[in-house]
């Protein structure tokens, strides 16, 4: 029998907010109760939000991040010339700096491509499920990076900088727009169940922004999806009186600490995190409980009724359940006012590959990951669409860089930071288009003078959320920092 707090709460009788907080123990309930009582009149009228710079086209974002570098030319960016020249010596027409030794012969796509939708978008076999939404997608095939090193390139896509110490995109959205729900985090991260990608939590940490804007990690399918949210089972000695006394003592210490440190926002952020944790004890179990979803919705996402036991090897069926489960939970979080959900596929835990870094074997690594991603992503798109939420929700698919059109060891591909693919759909995005082409090999942009950069993607995302990327700034160490640094242009051709 499952005895986790999440499952116990589902099975028990409903509690009022006040009853639950006094019974929850563990140092959270008492901290938050006073603040919650003060805010009840605000909650009744709706959660507080900050004002955008101009009317937004979208209210919320889902970012799908393929950690390890997904191969654009094997999934989305069909190159007939590679099929024609397969096995011939590669000639890039210029010296190429490869990350390892991936400058072997030209290598055709591992899978066959075929057109989908009225747009005729060419997609490969593992991502064929996305064909059901082909006319909703906008592809960018001329995206360029700055580095072929995973950690730096991942940070660039996630935070706009190659070095750690800068806030993630979801943190900026939280800072700029605030929350639509006082009982759940503004920015939620659903990591790969096998481990974190390069840089770990630095990809979604608030850095110099107030700490409450950091991403909150949630693991759908686990007995305890949110770490340390509920008191440990050994804490049954806590009583209501001891809880009240402890919170009174902590409140006194906190006031003394804050009074001696005027201008230091860390204590306030910590108290806010405690308050949010107490609210989440009520809201999170309901938001993460997919047991009442009908069978046709589970099937749409490729999700099984009961969560599987995750295998050590990559298995296509389990990948569909795993990624689809996160996409379904993302939809439930968006419905409840979470503004930014980041879903990760792939980790950084070595061999055999548990990510998209397919130096050895594209088919072995990309196949199950891609089919799982495609089923979950198209389920999310179609589900949001039928609920009327896609029109004001942006979905962004990205990875840190692409892979080379030449072989590495016969079955793999090396890193390609010179050109790769993103796709977007939803709020304010044109549908069924391609903006920006790669060259005949998928090696570099066809127009090398006018590539797309991650700064442009970030600027466009903020624009759709009603935020001017040049005005969304935070003063840090004497510099007005922003997500796009000193770069970035809104991609006008993407806007509906």
Image: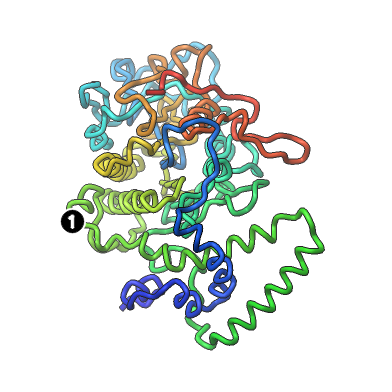
The x, y position of residue 131, in whole percent, is 23, 32
Q: Is residue 200 above or below residue 236?
A: above
Judging depth in this view, the residue of 349 and 293 nearest the camera is 293
Image quarter (top left, top right, bottom left or bottom right) of the C terminus: top left
In the displayed structure image, the side of residue 378 where residue 241 appears, left or right: right
The x, y position of residue 346, in whole percent, is 43, 47
Image quarter (top left, top right, bottom left or bottom right) of the N terminus: bottom left
Judging depth in this view, the residue of 7 and 393 nearest the camera is 393
Mark 1 residue crowding within 10 angstroms, few (<14) / some (14–19) / many (20+): few
Residue 11 in which image quadrant: bottom left
Q: Residue at x 45, y 19 (%)?
A: 492
- Note whether residue 89 is visible: no
Instruction: State the SS at label 1.
Output: helix
Q: Residue at x 49, y 11 (%)?
A: 93
Q: Mark 1 highlights which residue? A: 295
The x, y position of residue 401, in whole percent, is 48, 32
- Note whether residue 345 is visible: yes
Q: Is residue 168 above or below residue 196?
A: above
Q: Is residue 443 above or below residue 15?
A: above
């Amino acid at each position: 029998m499952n005895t986790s707090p999440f499952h116990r709460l589902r099975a028990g009788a409903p509690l009022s907010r006040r009853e639950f907080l006094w019974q929850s123990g563990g140092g959270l309930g008492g901290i938050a109760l006073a603040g919650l009582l003060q805010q009840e009149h605000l909650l009744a009228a709706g959660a507080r939000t900050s004002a955008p710079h101009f009317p937004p086209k979208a209210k919320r974002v889902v970012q799908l991040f393929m950690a390890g570098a997904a191969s654009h030319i094997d999934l989305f960016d069909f190159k007939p010339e590679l099929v024609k020249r397969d096995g011939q010596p590669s000639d890039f027409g210029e010296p190429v700096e490869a990350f390892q030794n991936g400058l072997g012969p030209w290598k055709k796509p591992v899978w066959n491509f075929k057109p989908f939708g009225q747009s005729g978008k060419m997609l490969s076999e593992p991502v064929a499920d996305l064909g059901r939404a082909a006319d909703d997608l906008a592809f960018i095939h001329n995206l360029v990076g700055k580095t072929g090193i995973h950690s730096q390139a991942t940070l660039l896509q996630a935070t706009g900088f190659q070095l750690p110490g800068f806030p993630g995109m979801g943190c900026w959205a939280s800072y700029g727009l605030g929350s639509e729900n006082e009982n759940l985090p503004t920015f939620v991260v659903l990591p790969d169940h096998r481990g974190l990608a390069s840089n770990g939590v630095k990809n979604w940490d608030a850095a110099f922004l107030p700490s409450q804007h950091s991403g909150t990690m949630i693991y759908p399918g686990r007995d305890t999806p949110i770490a340390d949210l509920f008191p440990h089972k050994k804490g049954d000695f806590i009583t209501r009186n001891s809880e009240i006394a402890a919170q009174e003592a902590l409140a006194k210490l906190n006031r003394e600490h804050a009074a001696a440190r005027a201008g230091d926002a860390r204590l306030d952020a910590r108290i806010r995190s405690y308050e949010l944790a107490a609210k989440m004890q009520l809201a999170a179990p309901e938001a993460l409980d997919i047991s009442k979803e009908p069978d046709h919705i589970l099937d749409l996402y490729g999700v099984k009724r009961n969560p599987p036991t995750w295998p050590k090897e990559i298995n296509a069926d389990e990948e569909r359940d795993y990624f689809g489960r996160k996409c379904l939970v993302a939809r439930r979080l968006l419905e409840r006012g979470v503004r930014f959900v980041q879903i990760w596929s792939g980790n950084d835990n070595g061999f055999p590959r548990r990510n998209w870094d397919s130096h050895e074997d594209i088919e072995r690594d990309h196949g199950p990951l891609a089919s799982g991603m495609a089923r979950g992503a198209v389920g999310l798109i179609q589900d949001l669409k039928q609920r009327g939420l896609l029109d004001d929700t942006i979905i962004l698919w990205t990875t840190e860089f692409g892979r080379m059109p030449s072989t590495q060891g016969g079955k793999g591909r090396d890193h390609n930071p010179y050109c790769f693919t993103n796709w977007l759909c939803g709020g304010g995005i044109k549908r069924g288009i391609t903006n920006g082409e790669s060259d005949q090999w998928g090696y570099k942009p066809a127009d090398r003078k006018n590539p797309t950069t991650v700064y442009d993607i970030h600027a466009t995302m903020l624009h759709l959320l009603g935020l001017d990327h040049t005005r969304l700034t935070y003063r840090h160490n004497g510099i007005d920092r922003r997500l796009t640094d000193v770069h970035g242009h809104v991609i006008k051709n993407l806007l509906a």
